[in-house]
Image: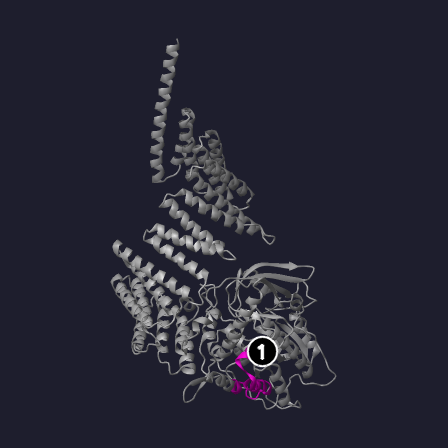
Amino acid sequence: MGCKHSKIAVETSNNNVSTSINLQNLQTTTPVSVITNATTTTSDTQVTVFNRERVNLESHQLIWLDHNVSSNNDINTSTTFEGLGKIVAYTKLFHDIEGCLQYIERTKDTATFLVCSGKLGQALIPQIHNLKTIWLTYIYYHNKQYHQQWASNYSKVRLIMLKEIKQVYVTLEHLLNDLTQDVEEYLKHVKDGFFSDIGRKDQTIEYFFSSWETYFCNFLVHLPYPTECFKQFISIMKNYYEGNTTQVGILKEFEHDYKPDRAVWWYTRDTFLYRLMNRALRQHNIEVMFLFGFFLHDIYRQLKKEHEKFILTHIENPVVKVYRGQVMSNAEIKKLNHSSLIVNTSFFSTSLDRSSATAFLDQSSQHNDELQNILFEIEIDVRQQSRPYGNISHLSQFENENELLFMIGTQFRNDNISYIESEKIWIVKLSLIYTTDNKDNQDFKNTSNRRILKRCVNTLCDVRFMYNVSAEDVNTIFNGLMNDLYPSEKWLLAVKMGCLARKAQRNLFGFTSALSNYNEAIKIWTKFMNDDELNCSFDIGTIHEHIGGCYYHKKNNLVSAKEHYDLAISYFQSAIEKVVMDYELMNIHDKLRDVYLLKMEVSNDKEEKTENGLMVIKHKELSIQNMLKCPSSNDMKAASDMEDLAHIYRSIFRYDDSLINYAKALEIYLQHFEPDFLNIRLICEQIIKINIEYKYDYHSALRYQLLKHEYILKDCAPKSTDNEYDIDHKIVQTVKSHKELADIYILSHQYDLANENLIISLKLYNESKRSFVILEIAAVEEKLADDYIALCHYESATKHLNNAIKLYKECEWYNKDKRIAAIEEKIADIYTTVRQYDLASEHLTKAMELYQGIDWYFDKKKIVTIQEKIATIQKNIKTVQRSTTRRTYVDL
């Protein structure tokens, strides 16, 4: 019986069955309100042990509520409980509603299958039916007529996700059969789920695109795990699943057969491994993620190799399409429809064969069902840098599925979602997008495990990661590192204190706490100054950089800030002497560049600013040189660094050098197989601005404006998937580009071409459906008038200015009278130029009346100016009249 049934089917039996199903000799303990873990200490490490009575590592649980849960009856209760354990590994028994409700409230992060007697169900269900974590509810009873009466109130209620009152039962065997099927359906949904909210830890701050899982997994997959990790995992899991013969049997097999090159095979097998790991990711359960760290590490290594093979086999045909079919709730589809960028928070399985993907869909699904068929069509370009993915068919337990597996944290662009009525299916088109935060294995070769560990741990201090973790998370992470994994590496405490200081520094009132933690970190690092392998001068320099930031931003103490910036520079320079890898040298030069930039910011002396700016440039150039030596270097990173260098040159007024570096960066972006339109546009804007404002080179500015315009037109090309908003947005962007092009044509005195682009702008604006487009059309009319004035086409100029006035009068804009007054003044200037003084005086009078209606000091000054113009015109009129009289007298 599937999860789609919503009615309570009332079943009866001729047997006189008790309304309570009693489970003999099963002790129930009221769950504690605070979930805690125990630890066991060995000679070398302190290992986390999960207390099964207090901690559920699974994503789901079974709650059985019955008054007679601990009494005796004729049912073979040991067999019953063993059967329940095989269906749902984590089962809780309750005999009272209050205790059951308290436990449900405490386990909001866990999908719950609830079984209860009819009488208790009648009292309990109204209190819990709105909870999204109640996946399914099963009722067993004796009195059909009575229980059907109250249960009918919920007969068609399908709550969040797949939740419903499943059945009303009188036979235990029937209930267990249905429970088995429904749990299997749930597990399939969880494995497929992209956005399942159940079990997801709430995040109140999301400043960065990449998810918490991405950063933490980056850290976990590169850690050098001690050999004891595997044994600890087996020991902890055996302890956790003690008494569960099914899971213990799987663990014994895993212990005997597992090898790193079999990690993917074990992940694809239907066991607790993928369930517990994915739940830990969704919940941000750091202890469990550490426990599975070696497993993640091995999967990543296998996937990395397969990714390299996949690229080589698709060099000639680099664009590949893969598919994934699954069932989603309407709520999930709605969430997906509002997500332009997607990061998968667990491993993401797809197929190279469309028919294989659609085979998993529900062929009976209808458009108005709660559960809908979804087919993801994902386009990948193997030339695109990304997190690893690969064809794992030969590594998987299911060799015939032609499966392509994506690593956790892979980023996709959501291109389009549409419903295909003929197939009764939603098509979601995704594209793999470029990512730069992926570390390369080459960076970790030919170096010691301690250096690798230190590099991994230092990534935890990344500000992007710090945004998404709490101080409690920081403590948990480092407790795992220092107690379970690397107890002999005492310097880890210094990194922990530095991370806590970074967290405190972000707090508005965290100055004292941050400073205290930073100083404690420095004390610890000082003990390792002679450890060349750690090269802690780099870390102490980083801390002084952050302390300088504290004094500057929190206290506005420039003197103390400069002192610590100078100390940071001194320590970074010392660190250079101990580097081994090119990427280490690159990082130090990046740090020196950052500190000199900060010194520029706090300096008020122009010469000092310039001197620091030159040091910024020096270290940025050295950083680029070392980056290009690294095996993991890539052109896009080089382009970004050259762009940064151009910004720095511009800040110290070295515009020629700035233009050279902008041009180099632009050339790299243009040569990329998939040009980044945004980066191209932004660099062109910088080059145009320098050429116009500082170089007065309108010819060069025009060349880059034309290039920018070309890529805007490409980016705004119509697509079949465009909705009304997309069409309108593209029109606006195209119009803006034509207007900017017209401005530069005017500066270059190419008025005909300026006029041509403005007319195109006007035409496109008239096609737009934006509510405030009238103002923009009026602005274009004004620009056209200016263009005609430059061409001395005064009649056309006057026509467009009058059009602008008409448009402004039609719109609701607080500033329109001021704008109309300015246009009236401009029309008056035209009439003055052609010596039609009466008309000029008329329009100046209109302008003055409008300005007089605006009670602003600025406009009173304008009134004086207009009065002066009117006086001048009156003189001109009298002069013309005298001249006319004189000519008439001469003629006579």
Q: What kind of element bears circle 1?
A: helix
| Residue 264 magenta-highlighted | no
x, y percent for residue 153: 65, 70
As rendered, which of 220 and 369 lies closer to the eye? 220
- Residue at 54% across, 86% down: 255
- Relative to residue 448, is residue 884 depicted above or below? above
Which amino acid, mark 1? Answer: Trp
Residue 171 appears left or right of 261: right
Residue 378 appears left or right of 18: left
The colouring scheme, among rainbow, by chain, secondary structure or one colour, is: one colour
Quadrant of image for the N terminus: bottom right
Quadrant position of residue 524: bottom left
Q: Which residues are magenta?
A: 237-263
x, y percent for residue 3: 65, 72
Quadrant position of residue 609: bottom left
Mark 1 surroundings: few (<14), some (14-19) or many (≥20) residues within 10 A: some
x, y percent for residue 407: 53, 70
| Residue 259 magenta-highlighted | yes
x, y percent for residue 337: 57, 60
Task: Kindly give the residue lying farthest to the top in the view shown.
Answer: 892
The majority secondary structure of the magenta stretch comes to helix
Q: How many marks?
A: 1
- Residue at 25% across, 54% down: 607
Name the residue tied to disc 1: 265
As rendered, which of 793 and 68 lies closer to the eye? 793
Quadrant of image for the C terminus: top left
As rendered, which of 32 and 517 lies closer to the eye? 517
